[in-house]
Amino acid sequence: MLKPRFTQDQIRVIVSELVDGRMAGEISRRYGISISTLYRWRAKVAGERQPDDKERLRLLEDEHRRLKKQFAELTLDYATLRAALIRDVRGDC
């Protein structure tokens, strides 16, 4: 089996040029691929699953919840360390 000439990231960049409005013939000449390959790639890239709005919102809410928890833990650590430092300073005087 032949090694592919283009990586998936390169294919996405090439297809994005087509979506942005460049002419298919111009793109195919520049990268040395056929127009049918370009359209096949476009169909494959468009078929890749993009998270819908509900799923994206759920992921963002999960991340927000996780970050709030981390913030609370760090705030508690900070308050504890600050109280211990103040006690140490007062004890030395």
Image: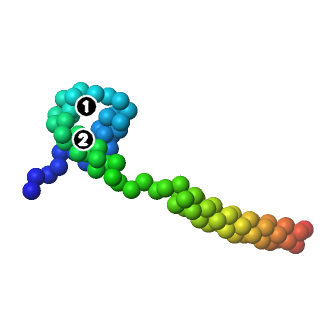
Of the residues shown, which amino acid type is indicated by label 2?
Tyr
Vertical position of residue 85 compared to residue 17: above or below: below
Please report whichever mark, 2 or 1, sits nearer to the chain's N-terminal start.
Answer: 1
- Residue 24 marker: 1
Of the residues shown, which amino acid type is indicated by label 1?
Ala
Measured as percent of width and height from the top left, residue 17 is found at: 33, 34
Nearer-the-camera pick, 61 or 77: 61
According to the picture, the residue beneath numbered tag 2 turns out to be 39
Measured as percent of width and height from the top left, residue 36 is found at: 18, 40
Vertical position of residue 78 compared to residue 34: above or below: below
Measured as percent of width and height from the top left, residue 87 is found at: 85, 71
| Mark 2 vs 1: CB contact within 8 A | yes
Q: Does residue 24 appear anywhere in the picture?
A: yes
Q: Residue at x 29, y 38 (%)?
A: 14
User: Where the C terminus falls, by quadrant?
Assistant: bottom right
Q: Residue furthest left?
A: 1
